Image: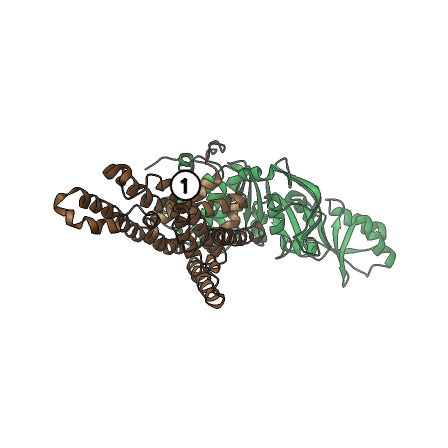
């Protein structure tokens, strides 16, 4: 779906690149794009949309090379739902979705028919004839999603689609995101700071900070990695050579007050007991660590990236 | 009640659409159509047009009706075939047009800025060049199309009533249409350039009016200080008035040929450059 190697993007007159050394390959699916403000998410989206030309490196989006002449035509195959309210306030939902459809290349009649269909898909029925200035936040988000889908894109960028929604609206929006991939077959890039949203719908994850990828991989790989996280406590304090030998068991992520936070190399927790027996230590506590995604994100942002399995 | 498919069917062919420039211009036209401003100016321009046409018809009556013969001398004084009469076919309408251009053109780019839709436009297969061409095209086509009947209707009526001896020259459209195109391009570029400086449509209207009146005041000031007539070419209102006069050959036009050429080029370059800089994608914040 998207692949790039050593990608660097630099704004004119900027001393440091906004994105540097990005190498990644994303499969078709729902990709969660996480990162704090200023991490480079928007720059990455702009680059994928062909609005910025990479200063170094190579990459393709849907098979089209970044920065090529074909990049503009590529935008006809991409849908983009911005984070902010990019709605034409003095037009109805129907009028503006038809307008965006026409801008994507649909004939006027086809765009009007398509606007009805896509607004029905996102759950806006009769309200579609009213000016959007009177819409609730949830309705406005759905209009934005509709304009991103009106031309049947192969790839959809959704920037904070659940912003400002109540729990029910959030659930309905995430259901729509899942349907966009499952029923329409479109790849989805979901940029969000709500980690629960990403956890619920994404099957791949990219964590970005200061213009660099801090962690990336499949959610399944991440979950497998999380399943191997355990906390160990021994009866006696481990000797230095025993602590060094812990590397045979797995990666020590943290050690404090006799508690060892480990990522086991094997999925079998009983290996920890066998290791303790072999080392002459008494293991008195083995607690699986059910990390939440936000802990993974925080660790990744602080430079302690967890292995998230393969792509 | 329409029946929809349970899910979204694939979209039709994306290659059958119209060029983005045309789509953007049509959307701006539909927006103008919805606004009350269109009705107000429509009435104003229609009244002016009827006055122009009625003037020619009355002139025709004066010349052909025996009962009205005593008034013929008076009629000849107002319905001559002189160059000034040809140029005046556009004059009151073009003044009113500045207000329409300010009210409509002021919001053309500023409204997209306010609603933050320009980055989304660029996220579609639309280049900044397409966007600017659409805005300039709309802002130029609007005054041109409004002025068109002010030339064509009197010309047609004059031909029908009095043939080649009518008050409107048979060749008048050949001279006035290019003049209208230049004046309209001047109005359009100024409106789009000034609108691109504003963050709201209301501020855009102020920018256009301020730029037009400010440039006029500056030109007047410089004229008063230096006594050089050529500086009048800085005034866009005088320039728009001067082009029909220049092309029909009025003896003493408001602005001479060279200053008019330079002044128009300066305005077109200045406002278009501003619009280009203010609407480029780097201004787009996704």
| Residue A101 shows in the view | no
Q: Chain of mark 1?
A: A
A254 with respect to A185 (left or right): right
Q: Which chain is brown?
A: B
Residue projecting furthest to the bottom: B225
Across and down, in percent, residue B79 comes to 26, 48
Q: Which quadrant does the C terminus of chain A fall into?
A: top right
Residue A79 vertical position relative to residue A230 in the rendered view, above or below:
above
A60 with respect to A107 (left or right): right
B56 with respect to B134 (left or right): left
Q: Quadrant of residue A301?
A: bottom right
Identify which residue is drawn at 36% across, 35% down.
B3
Question: According to the image, label 1 marks what residue?
Answer: A120
Q: Secondary structure at mark 1?
A: helix
Q: Which chain is green?
A: A
Nearest to the observer: residue B38 or residue A2? B38
Identify which residue is drawn at 37% across, 56% down.
B99
């Amino acid at each position: 779906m998207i692949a790039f190697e050593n990608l660097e993007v630099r704004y004119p007159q900027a001393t440091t690149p906004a994105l540097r050394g990005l190498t990644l390959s994303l499969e078709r699916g729902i990709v969660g794009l996480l990162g704090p403000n200023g991490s480079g998410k928007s720059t990455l989206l702009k680059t994928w949309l062909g609005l910025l030309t990479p200063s170094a490196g190579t990459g393709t989006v849907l098979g089209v090379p970044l920065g090529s002449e074909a990049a503009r035509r590529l935008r006809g195959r991409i849908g983009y739902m911005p984070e902010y309210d990019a709605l034409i306030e003095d037009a109805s939902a129907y009028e503006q979705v038809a307008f965006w459809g026409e801008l994507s290349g649909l004939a006027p009649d086809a765009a009007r028919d398509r606007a009805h269909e896509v607004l029905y898909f996102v759950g806006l029925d009769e309200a579609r004839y009213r000016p959007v200035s009177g819409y609730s936040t949830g309705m406005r988000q759905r209009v934005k999603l509709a304009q991103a889908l009106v031309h049947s894109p192969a790839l959809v960028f959704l920037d904070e689609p659940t912003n400002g929604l109540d729990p029910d609206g959030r659930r309905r929006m995430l259901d729509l995101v899942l349907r966009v991939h499952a029923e329409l077959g479109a790849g989805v890039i979901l940029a969000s700071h709500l980690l629960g949203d990403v956890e619920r719908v994404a099957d791949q994850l990219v964590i970005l900070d200061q213009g660099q990828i801090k962690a990336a991989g499949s959610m399944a790989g991440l979950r497998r990695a999380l399943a191997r996280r355990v906390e160990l406590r021994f009866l006696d304090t481990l000797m230095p050579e025993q602590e060094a030998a812990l590397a045979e068991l797995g990666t020590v992520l943290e050690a404090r007050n006799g508690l060892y936070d480990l990522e086991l190399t094997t999925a079998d927790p009983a290996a920890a007991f066998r290791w303790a027996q072999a080392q002459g230590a008494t293991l008195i506590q083995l607690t699986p660590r059910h990390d939440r995604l936000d802990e993974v994100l925080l660790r990744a942002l602080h430079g302690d990236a967890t292995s998230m399995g393969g792509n | 009640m329409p029946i929809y498919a349970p899910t979204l069917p694939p979209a039709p062919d994306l290659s059958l659409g119209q060029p983005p420039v045309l789509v953007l211009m049509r959307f701006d036209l539909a927006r103008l159509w919805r606004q009350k401003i269109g009705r107000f100016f429509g009435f104003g321009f229609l009244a002016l047009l009827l006055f122009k046409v009625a003037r020619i018809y009355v002139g025709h009556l004066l010349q052909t009706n025996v009962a009205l013969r005593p008034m013929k001398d008076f009629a000849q004084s107002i319905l001559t075939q002189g160059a000034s009469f040809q140029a005046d076919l556009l004059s009151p309408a073009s003044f009113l047009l500045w207000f329409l251009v300010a009210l409509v053109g002021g919001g053309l780019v500023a409204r997209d800025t306010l609603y933050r839709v320009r980055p989304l436009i660029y996220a579609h297969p639309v280049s900044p060049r397409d966007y600017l061409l659409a805005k300039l095209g709309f802002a130029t086509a609007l005054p041109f199309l409004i002025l068109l009947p002010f030339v064509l209707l009197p010309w047609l009526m004059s031909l029908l009533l009095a043939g080649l001896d009518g008050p409107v020259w048979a060749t008048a459209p050949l001279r006035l249409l290019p003049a209208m195109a230049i004046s309209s391009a001047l109005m359009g570029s100024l409106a789009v350039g000034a609108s691109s400086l504003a963050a709201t449509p209301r501020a855009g209207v102020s920018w256009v009016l301020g730029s037009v009146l400010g440039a006029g005041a500056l030109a007047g000031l410089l004229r008063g200080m230096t006594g050089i007539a050529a500086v009048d070419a800085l005034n866009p209102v005088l320039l728009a008035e001067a082009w029909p006069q220049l092309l029909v050959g009025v003896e003493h036009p408001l602005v001479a040929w060279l200053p008019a050429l330079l002044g128009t080029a300066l305005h077109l370059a200045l406002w278009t450059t501003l619009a280009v800089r203010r609407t480029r994608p780097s201004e787009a914040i996704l």
